[in-house]
Amino acid sequence: MKLPKEELLQIFRQTNALLDGHFLLTSGLHSPHYFQCAKVLQYPKYLHLFAGELAKHFEYSEIELVISPAVGGVVVGTEVGRMLDVRTIFAERENGVMSLRRGFEMKKGERVLVVEDVVTTGGSVNEIIELAKKADATLAGVGFIVDRSNGKTKFNAKTFSALLMDVITYTPDTCPLCKDGSLAVKPGSRGL
């Protein structure tokens, strides 16, 4: 059973994981709201709660591997993999390109679940899906904690998010916060 949206939002607020201000998102868009999932996932009970929602949804999908983009998806991906009792790896950027390093690999035909913390445009997830295609792995699903697009971002796979949100975003040239003189801050991990 999916947890009620207001209950999930309350968890984000009480852990200071839902921020208000002027933010530059990984996608390059600007927003007055930012989900800093690392702040909520630092608490084992919430990590277990959110990862449990994802694992429950995919428990009968014959998942063989969970893969996440570094840095944001690693913690939740690892916990989902533990709950599903499958091998768990992550992809990371090397010279700006998402790649498998550290001896990680996806095997031909392996049923792969991509797990991310927050999705806005799906850029990082799509990069991992491309890695799976190149490896001839089978994309069995995509799961994430927060879908900032409220279901508008689509993947060619079974998809599930614990929390759907229609969060306001602006292109930098149309951002009213910029026009008011506010500077966008980037609290995420893409620069790592």
Image (cartoon, helix red, strand yellow):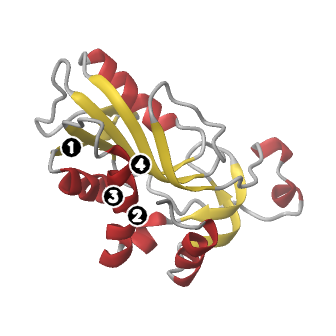
Is residue 113 visible to us here? yes
Q: Amino acid at mark 2?
A: Phe
Q: Amino acid at mark 4?
A: Glu
Q: Residue at x 63, y 42 (%)?
A: 151
Mark 3 touches mark 4? (CB < 8 Å): yes
- Point out the tag, 1 or 4, that comes first from the N-terminus: 1
Q: Secondary structure at mark 3?
A: helix
Disc marking residue 89: 1
Q: Residue at x 25, y 21 (%)?
A: 137
What is the C-alpha distance between the residues marked 1 and 4? Answer: 12 Å
Q: Secondary structure at mark 2?
A: helix
Q: Residue at x 71, y 55 (%)?
A: 167
Q: Amino acid at mark 3?
A: Val
Residue 179 is situated, as x and y percent measured from the top left of the image, at 88, 56
Q: Secondary structure at mark 1?
A: strand
- Point out the tag, 1 or 2, that comes first from the N-terminus: 2
Disc marking residue 76: 3
Residue farthest to the left? Answer: 103
Mark 1 touches mark 2? (CB < 8 Å): no
**Quadrant of residue 95 in the image?**
top left
The residue labelled by disc 4 is: 116
